[in-house]
Image (cartoon, rainbow, N blue to C red):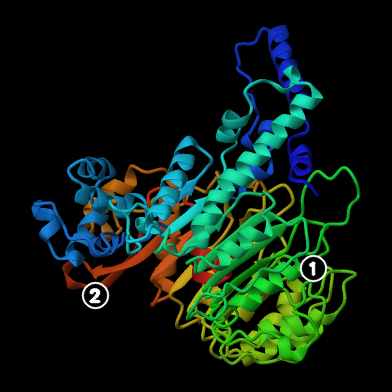
Amino acid sequence: MPISAVLQDLYGPLADLDLEKRRIDQLQRSRGSDRKITWPPSDTGLLGVANLTRGFVFGRTVERPLPLSFDRVMETRATTSTATLLNLPVELLTLIVRHIEPSALANLALVSRDCRQLARSRQFAVLHLDYSNRSFQLLSLLCRELKERALPGSNGLTSLPSLGVCIQRIVVLTSSVFFKSAHLRRTSLELTETQKYDWLCRASEVYHDFYLGQLGRLLSDSRALPHLSLLDWQDGVILPKSFYDSLARSNVRDLRLFGPLVDGVFSIDPPNIPGVKGWPLRNLHINLQKPPGRKTPTKPKSTSALCASILRQCSETLESLMWQTASAGFTDPQSFGTDPSKMPCFPKLRRLSLAGNVIFADSATLNALLHAPLRVLFTNTESAPGANTSKEICFRERGCIRTLETFVWNFAHLEKPHSMDFLQANSHLFKLSLCPPIRGELLEDKLLPLLSQKFLSLKSLDLTWREASIPDSALEKIGTIRSLEQIQLSALGKPGSRNYWLVDHEAVREHLSILPRLTRISFRQDAYRKMSPDKENATESNHPSIPAFGEPEDPLRDVVPEMHAKLLSKPGHLLNMLNEANEYSEVFPRLEWIYIGRIQMTIKTTEGVSGEGQLKYAVPVSNYRQDCTGLLNEMFGAGTTELEM
C-alpha cells in the first residue's frame, strides 16, 4: 500500500476537525460564556494523527544512564584544556558530572571544547527525537560526523570532539505539535483535494525519506553511534524493511518496538557483521500494530515472518523478551516454521512476557520459548476463545521449569476453566502473582490449598479477588502458607465503588499473624468507612475517626518527639494509617514495610522509655498518598510486563 495512501487514512478527516472547531467557537459565542473551550481537545485528536501522538498516551520515560567516562567520549584525543577539573582521575570525574546541576552543566560547556565534551556526556546520554527543529538539526549534525569519519585518512575520527560518541539511548516519539508546524501551513478547508494529496505526499517524503532515512543511515553504520545501546521506538508509522535491516546492523542491544505498523510480509536480512553472529540483542520488546483507518476490509498482513526473523537473529544472546499482541481483533498467528532443524534455541533467555493474547500457529513455536532457562514468566496458559488449544497442551506438557522463580499468571480468559497442572509442576516458585482479579471459589477451592500443601518455598504472593472483599475463610487458608515473606491483597469492591474495597484489618491480623517470616504487606485499592450511620457508604477519600496517633499515653511521644509533632499537623488519613501500621508492627515481629491507604511506610525500632525494651513504630516514606504501581509490580513480580533495560 503506498505511503501516501496510509497517510490519507491517518490524516484524512482534517475538514471534519476544522468544522468541529468552528462549531465549538459558534457554541461558545451563542452561550456568551467566559469559559474557554480548549481546542484541540487532546493531542491524540490533533490533525487525526493518532499514531504519531501515541507516546502521549502510551509513552514512558527512559531511564537516563550513567554518563560515559571522559576518556571514552574523547576517544583517542589528548586533553588540550588546562582546567584543573579535567586533570582528575576519570572515575572521579564521571561521579562529579553525575551531580552537576543542569544549568551549571550548560555553563561548563561554554568553557572549552574539552569541557563541552564532558558536559555532552551527560546532556546527550539520551537523545529524544520528537520531530522538532532541534531533532532535524541533531540528525543532520550526526550525519555530517559520519561522513567525516568515512573520509580517507581520518582513522574513523572527527576533527572535533563528536556528539554521536556521547549518545547511549535514543527515544523516537513524534510530537503532533511539531508535526503540524512542519507540514500544515493552512487549515484543510483552504486546500483543494489535489492540494491535500500533494501535502500528504510531501509530508510522507520528509518523514520517510529524509527524517527516517537519516536515522536509518546512522543506525546502519556502527561508527556513527558507537556507544548506542537502546532504541525506544514509539511512533505508530509503517517502517520499511530497509529500516529493520539497518537496526540489525546497529550497535543497539536493547530494542523496544512499541507500535510500529506492519503493511507487508517480509523478513530481515542477517546483519553479516564481521566477528558477530546474528543480531546480538539482549532485551527485546515487540508490539507491532496493523494500519488503522482502513476504508476497505483488507486483511492485515501477518507479522509472523518479521517477528520470527528478528527472534532467529537474536536467539543466541537474548536475555529478556516481551511479546505483546497486536491491535484488538487482529488475529495474527506466530510461527517459527515446522522444520525442527530450523527451530531457534534461546540459551540465555531469562525473562519472558507474553502479554495480551499472543497467538501461536503451532506448539513448536511456544515450546521453543518455554524450553529456555526462564527465571521470570508472565503469560496466560489458556488459548483465546475459538483459537486452537495448542497453548494449553504446551503448558501441560512442559511441566517443571527448574530455573523458574517468578510466575505472573495472567487469567486473560476468565470464562474458561483453568488447569493447575503447570502451576503444580512448578512448586519450587519463589514469587506468584495472579491477574486480573480471580473468582473467590477458584482461589479458595483450588489455588490456596495447593499452595499450602505443595509450595514450601513460596516467599511472595499477590492475589486479587473479584468479589467485594476477602472472606475470613480465605485469609485463614493464606495463613497456612508458612513460607511467605511478603503478600499483597486486593479485591474489586462493591459495584460503584471504583474498584475500592473495605479492608477488615482485624481479620487480616488475626488470620495472618501465624506467618512467622512476613516482612512486607501491601493493600491495593483499599478504602475505609467514614463515620456515619450509613456503614455501607465508603470511598477512598472518607476514612474513620480512629484515635489519633500520638495520644498522651503513647510512648512514642517521648521517644520521637520531632516525628510526633510533624505528624499531628498532617491530615487525619495519615494518622489513621499510621495507627493501623503500628498495629501490624505489633502482630508481625519481622515486619519491615507496609503499603496501606496508598501510603508506604517502613517499620523502625527504637529503645523504649527508661530502657523498657524496644519499641516498633511506622514511619511514612512520604506524607501524602502515592500510586506506587511501578514499585509494587516490581516487588511482587508483575513488573515483568515492563522489562528492564
Residue at 41% in and 48% down: 144
Q: Is residue 620 visible?
A: no
Reply above or below: 28 against 349.
above
Reply above or below: 125 against 283.
above
Along the polypeptide, which appears first: circle 2 or circle 1? 1
Residue 219 x, y percent position in the rendering: 51, 59
- 162 and 331: which is toward the camera: 162
Q: Secondary structure at mark 2?
A: loop
Q: Is 516 positioned to the left or the right of 323 in the image? A: left
Residue 131 x, y percent position in the rendering: 54, 40
Indicate the quadrant where residue 15 lies.
top right
- 415 and 157: which is toward the camera: 157
- 603 and 309: which is toward the camera: 309
As drawn, the label of residue 478 is: none
Labels 2 & 1 near each other (Cβ < 8 A): no
Instruction: Give the amino acid type for the residue marked by disc 1 in the picture.
Output: Leu
Count of marks overlaid on the render? 2
In 3D space, how far apart are the residues under numbered discs 2 and 1 (Cα atoms)?
A: 51 Å
Reply above or below: 56 against 614.
above
Residue 42 x, y percent position in the rendering: 63, 33
Instruction: Give the amino acid type for the residue marked by disc 2 in the picture.
Output: Gly
List the residue tagged with mark 1: 414
List the residue tagged with mark 2: 613
Q: Secondary structure at mark 1?
A: loop
Residue 406 x, y percent position in the rendering: 57, 79
Q: Residues within 10 Å of mark 1 (few under 14, many from 20)?
A: few
